[in-house]
């Protein structure tokens, strides 16, 4: 039975308690989630599309967009669906390890390969476009370095991801993670970063990175503390571009785009082929210049080349790639990467306490 609090004829921005159960996902035209800083402006634009379609075409679009800090529900119900009619017409999400599950993609992969759209040079070089056309990237989350130059102590700032593995950065790196207290394991952490480092540098490289990590904490907390004398931060923070730019002590800080490329997490959508024509207004919204401008101003750059200044001149992007993503069990790979990292990181923390 459908929860009466869910208004499927408009855009519902829902708390976890209000999220539709898996059995109702097939009634949705769009199920979406975005990084928290984008949720309010994204929903404002989505509301506008829904209202315009109602007013001009008499078309009701049923959209559910997650609010607050929620990430998993009701997305965790997608993999339990067996038939097309049990799935939303469109799913909007940053790239996540389960989004390429074969049970899901068989309902969202187009019958014919779409032509590759024009792209900014950094996006084309990084291979961000899914060659099978299932995951339609429209923006990226770049992860880069925020360097506190007052803590370098004569060391040159890191230029590449491999530099973060060097022993000179021992106890000097912070990246995103969260746990309620120091007596329990981390409940959340940047698993995309760990997976990417594991893919590129292997277990030995991930262990070297772990030995250099001082702390994991929320990206916003790191951004507000960077450039201070807080013991919770070090010389280097790995942050999304937005949080790096928001750091207040710019006289001590420098945003560094790695020379081998900022780590890019794609943001995109899955679209059932049978729903393409009906949901074209939603596709136009996701790929258009209006949303693109909002994304660019918030440092989540769109891949739409018509949006000028979305990327700094000459920067590069990198990510593990579609071949790797499709040929590996990313959930298992991510769990393996996390196990390696935390085994070495906790060991390093214990060694420091005992020394």
Image (cartoon, rainbow, N blue to C red):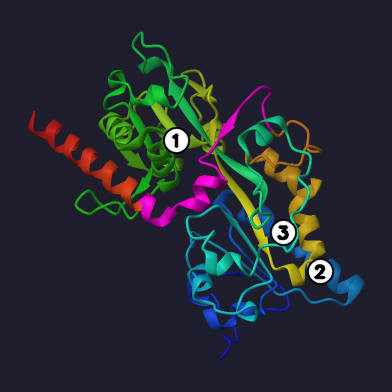
Hey, which residue is sitting farthest right in the picture?
56
The residue singled out by tag 3 in the image is: 44
Lower position in the chain sequence, tag 2 or tag 1: 2
Residue 231 in view of the camera: no
Q: Position of residue 337 (x, y in %)?
A: 33, 45
- The 10 Å Cα crowd at callout 1, few under 14, some 14 to 19, many 20 or more, is some
Position of residue 244 relative to residue 106, above or below, is above
Hey, which residue is sitting farthest top in the picture?
154
Residue 353 location, quadrant: top left
Q: Is residue 324 magenta?
A: yes
Q: CA distance from mark 1 to mark 3?
A: 27 Å
Badge nearest the viewer, 2 or 1: 2
Tell me, for residue 51, which label it has, or none. 2
- The 10 Å Cα crowd at callout 3, few under 14, some 14 to 19, many 20 or more, is few
Residue 205 location, quadrant: top left
What residue is shown at x 73% (from left), y 61% (from top)?
Answer: 46
Position of residue 240 relative to residue 72, above or below, is above
Q: Which residues are magenta?
A: 311-334
Q: Are marks 3 and 2 in contact (CB under 8 Å)?
A: no
Lower position in the chain sequence, tag 3 or tag 2: 3
Q: Is residue 272 magenta?
A: no
The residue singled out by tag 1 in the image is: 224
Q: CA distance from mark 3 to mark 2?
A: 11 Å
Hey, which residue is sitting farthest bottom in the picture?
1
Residue 193 in view of the camera: yes
Position of residue 218 relative to residue 121, above or below, is below
Please state which of residues 85 and 188 is positioned toward the viewer in this rendering.
85
Badge nearest the viewer, 1 or 3: 3
């Amino acid at each position: 039975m459908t929860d009466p609090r869910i208004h499927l004829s408009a855009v519902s921005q829902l708390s976890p308690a209000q999220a539709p159960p898996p059995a109702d996902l097939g009634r949705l035209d769009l199920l979406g989630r975005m990084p928290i800083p984008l949720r309010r402006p994204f929903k404002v634009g989505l509301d506008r599309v829904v209202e315009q379609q109602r007013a001009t075409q008499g078309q009701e679009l049923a959209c559910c967009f997650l609010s607050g800090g929620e990430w998993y529900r009701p997305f965790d119900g997608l993999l339990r669906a067996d038939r097309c009619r049990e799935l939303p017409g469109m799913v909007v999400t940053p790239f996540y390890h389960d989004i390429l599950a074969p049970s899901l993609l068989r309902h969202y992969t187009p019958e014919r390969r779409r032509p590759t759209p024009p792209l900014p040079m950094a996006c084309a070089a990084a291979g961000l476009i899914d060659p099978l056309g299932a995951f339609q990237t429209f923006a990226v989350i770049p992860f880069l370095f925020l360097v506190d130059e007052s803590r370098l102590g004569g060391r040159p700032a890191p230029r590449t991801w491999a530099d973060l593995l060097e022993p000179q950065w021992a106890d000097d790196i912070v990246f995103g993670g969260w746990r309620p207290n120091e007596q329990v394991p981390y409940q959340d952490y940047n698993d995309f970063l760990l997976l990417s480092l594991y893919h590129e540098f292997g277990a030995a490289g991930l262990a070297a990175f772990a030995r250099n990590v001082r702390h994991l904490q929320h990206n916003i907390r790191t951004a507000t503390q960077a450039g201070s004398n807080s013991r919770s931060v070090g010389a280097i923070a790995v942050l999304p571009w937005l949080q790096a730019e928001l750091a207040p002590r710019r006289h001590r800080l420098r945003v560094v785009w790695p020379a081998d490329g900022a780590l890019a997490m794609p943001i995109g959508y899955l679209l059932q082929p049978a729903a393409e024509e009906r949901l074209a207004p939603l596709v136009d919204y996701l790929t258009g210049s209006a949303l693109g401008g909002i994304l660019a101003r918030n440092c989540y750059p769109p891949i739409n080349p018509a949006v000028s200044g979305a990327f700094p001149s000459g920067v590069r992007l990198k990510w593990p790639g579609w071949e790797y993503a499709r040929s590996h069990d990313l959930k298992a790979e991510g769990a393996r990467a996390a196990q390696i990292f935390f085994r070495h990181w906790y060991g390093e923390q214990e060694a420091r306490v005992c020394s």
